[in-house]
Image (spheres, rainbow, N blue to C red):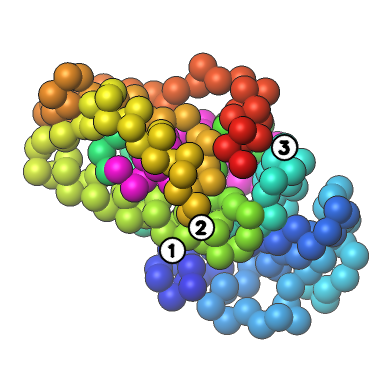
Amino acid sequence: MIHERGYVAATDGNLSVRLDSHRVLVTPTSMCKGMMVTSDLVTVDLSGEKLSGRRNVSSEIAMHLLIYKLRPDIKAVVHAHPPTATGYAAAGLPLNEALISEVVICLGAIPLAKYGTPGTPELTDALEPLVPQYDAILMSNHGVVTYGEDLLGAYMKMETVEHFAKVALVAHQLGRQQLLSHEEVEKLLAVRRKYAAANSVAPMPPAGNHNGSRPANGDGSRDQAPTGDTAGEARSRRRSAR
Ligand code: 13P
């Protein structure tokens, strides 16, 4: 699906599923995700050592293993380069504004991790502080990673990120952003607690002022994703959300 939808080009992107407490099923490196068959998949242990499969594992395996290590609740990871969201990542812009109610409910803020060379510890170091709190992260000058309780859930988050990026871009082109107010964001937080499809506990995006609207990029700057939460606070919110 990520290939069909144009979220990856050529051999871009990688996916994985946590099979059990010590095995992860991962896509192979340098293979078009639209041409892959089941026997191309590779199984590794939690240190990235290959257990089975005839191909080499994705060069981004360390990113997948980092997410499984930091988030015991996560069973699947999707990494792709959807063009609009990746455009935001290339422009150095997070998708962290309270513009669309469903996105606020399902994902909260979508932060931007600093740039790190793909396949190196630079990339995992950049993601590490964000993984405990968020379920979707823009990766500067690279792409997007999303994760969830199963592969479909992780994929759906990728769709939501790309769709939201398109909507945010249109609002920007129209020259106005009518941000949800603080009160409305608080009400969405209450809705999130009841809504079965929303299991995210990511921090809410910053709200707008009392009437919520402002010119797009009016002051030439964008809010950064809220980073006040510690990983411990995120974990305890995740527990109480269940
Ligand atoms: P792999 O083919 O090694 O999985 O890498 C693809 C990619 O998108 C790197 O960011």
| Image point (45%, 34%), residue name | 111
**Is residue 242 found inside the magenta-colored segment of the image?**
no
Three-letter code for the amino acid on which mark 2 is drawn? Ala
Sequence order check: which comes first, mark 1 or mark 3? 1
Q: Would you name the residue on which mark 2 appears?
A: 80
Mark 3 neighbour class, 10 Å CA radius: few under 14, some 14 to 19, many 20 or more:
some
Q: Which portion, as a residue range, is magenta? A: 101-122
Q: Would you name the residue on which mark 1 appears?
A: 7
Q: Say if residue 87 shows up in the picture.
A: no
Residue 124 rendering spot, x and y as whole percentages: 66, 37
Cβ(mark 2) to ligand 1 < 8 Å? yes
Quarter residue 17 falls in: bottom right
Cβ atoms at labels 1 and 2 below 8 Å apart: yes
Q: Would you name the residue on which mark 3 appears?
A: 70
Q: Nearer the viewer, residue 56 or 49?
A: 49
Quarter residue 16 falls in: bottom right
Spatial CA span between label 1 and label 3: 26 Å
